[in-house]
Image (cartoon, coloured by chain):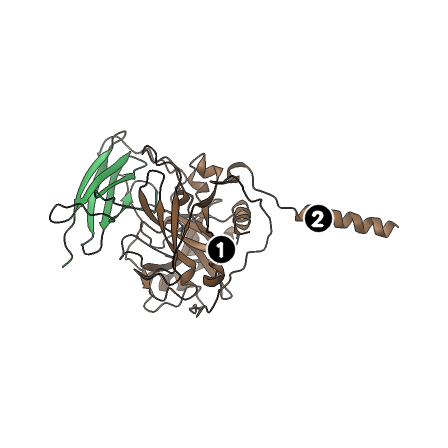
Amino acid sequence: MLVAGVVKDPTGKPVAGARVYFTSGPGGFPDIAGLTDEHGAFTLTAHGAGSYQLECAAEGYATASVTVAVRSGQDARVAILLESKK
Amino acid sequence: MAVKKKARKAATKTRKEALPRTPTGLHTPVSNEAEEATGGETSEPQRPSEGVDPETTPYRDSGIEDVSGFNPPRLRAARGAEAEMARLMVAPDVSGLKDIGEASFGPPPPIAEIVHGPDDRVQITSTSSYPWRVHASLLITARDNSMWIGTGWFIGPHTLITAGHVVHIKNSGVPGRDGWVKSIQVMPGRNGNTLPYGSVTSSSFRSVTGWTVNGDANYDYGAIIIPTQLGNTVGWFGFGAYSDQTLQNATGNISGYPGDKPSGTQWYDAHKIASVNSRKVFYDIDTAGGQSGSAVYRIVNGGRYGFAVHAYGGATTNSGTRITTPVFNNLLAWKA
């Protein structure tokens, strides 16, 4: 199953080059991080149904954490809105 | 005459024994290029090299690096504990990477985390010195042009070891993504925006059929061959295939480039090994996405020796592909 989404800044503009990675989920998962493209888009692979914690880090922004529910046989979509780092 | 015949026979036998033996089965080495190297075999660990002007960071007698500010409570407790305490920790079996899971969302299953308990990682800023410069930040371009970050480590002048899933993507579910990646930009000793040894881009990769064909996490290891001899400058780690007892008593060190920290910064952690099985090593060493491919290494008589390739986050421990004899043989061949 796929976990796909878009990362945007506080103004709603896409954030390219943000790092997106799982920090928790059912079973073991590869310790690799994806980078968002010029549209702020990313697609990660979830190897089992369950609840996943996804983090997104980008320079100048506070790290965002999102919980994603992945159902068997269904892709999940998520939108991540970053906040400026104070 | 009899003596001469015996000498010739012995010489022939020696030559036959010295011929390289390529691993077979799921450890059959593969490359994204037409020509593949043959394997070799030795029972002796490969020695490290510190490269040119290493300014080597000292290490502590406890088998960890001497890093300012690194003295996690759990490691202090482990040092004072009996060796049997580490062997009592039972790690989950993560060999079945494809966790089927449940369709419903009743009681949630146990959640795996890759930073376990307090985050003990410390940043390494002296990345132009040995051993830190052996670790390379990797920027990976996959077949579908998606970009990823990982970590690799030098084992020779032109060879870095990393996870199999760094060089060959498997079972992604994304059309056009699976297969050998297009290219990897290798940045040894990277420190944020500073590249003390520049960068080199590779499109020459190695892995094994257990990963590239079967997608079996037990065979998740690979190599990056760079077109320069940069390893002669930055140095490299040794590596070896060690016994269960040796690993169960070992302290594992990991340094790499996690995505949850400022871009391109290197972070280090160490802890006693939790457990091993025939193909994997399990440990409670904190990592995060981007550290796939990092060396899991021990310090022996001042030398750094990799014994696993970090690959996965897990329920209570993280895990890496163990360097066993066939893995060692492939690493040796890829180093040549």
Q: Does residue B178 sit above or below B68 in this rendering?
A: above
**Horizontal placement of B14 versus A55: left or right?**
right
The image position of residue A61, as x and y in percent, is 18, 54
The image position of residue B214, as x and y in percent, is 44, 34
Mark 2 closeness class: few <14, some 14–19, many ≥20 residues within 10 Å: few
Name the residue carrying label 2.
B15
Chain A takes which shade in the image?
A: green
Residue drawn at (49%, 49%) of the image:
B323
Q: Does residue B18 sit above or below B237 in this rendering?
A: above
The image position of residue B128, as x and y in percent, is 39, 65
Q: Amino acid at mark 1?
A: Ile
Q: Secondary structure at mark 1?
A: strand
Count of marks placed on residues: 2
The image position of residue B193, as x and y in percent, is 30, 60
Q: Amino acid at mark 2?
A: Arg
Chain B takes which shade in the image?
A: brown
Name the residue carrying label 1.
B155
